[in-house]
Amino acid sequence: MVVTQNYYKFQNKTYIQKSGLAMGAPSSSILSEIYLQFMENTKIFEILRNSKIEGYYKYVEDILIIYNENCTNIEEVHKLIQHHYT
């Protein structure tokens, strides 16, 4: 219900957001963190392990990935992760 009822007003006109979370809403940060944790634990860590990623560190919305360019094609890793998020 929280995700499907996003209304906002701009220049005295009311709009309905069709998808996504409302920016600035208290529930948005919690729901986005739950989604990110779910994706990391079900898909992303498997991709990182199979791609020989040496380090994966996250702080809030910042992510640092350490890899050896001789062993890992980072462009391929990026494509795989993007595929799972869309």
Image (cartoon, rainbow, N blue to C red):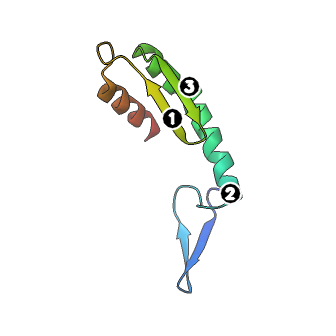
Q: What residue is rendered at 46% in x and 16% in y?
A: 54
Tag 1 near tag 2, CB within 8 Å: no
Percent coordinates x, y for residue 13 in the rendering = 54, 83
Q: Mark 2 points at which residue?
A: 2
The kind of residue on which mark 2 rests is: Val
Tag 3 near tag 2, CB within 8 Å: no
Badge 1 marks a residue whose secondary structure is strand
Report crowding for label 3: few under 14, some 14 to 19, many 20 or more residues within 10 A (C-alpha).
few
- Asked if residue 23 is positioned above or below residue 42 in the image, the reply reads below
Percent coordinates x, y for residue 78 in the rendering = 36, 31
Q: Give the numbered dot on residue 63.
A: 1
Query: Which mark is nearer the camera, 1 or 3?
Result: 1
Q: What residue is rendered at 34% in x and 32% in y?
A: 79
Indicate the quadrant where residue 82 lies: top left
Percent coordinates x, y for residue 24 in the rendering = 63, 61
- Asked if residue 68 is positioned above or below residue 74 in the image, the reply reads above
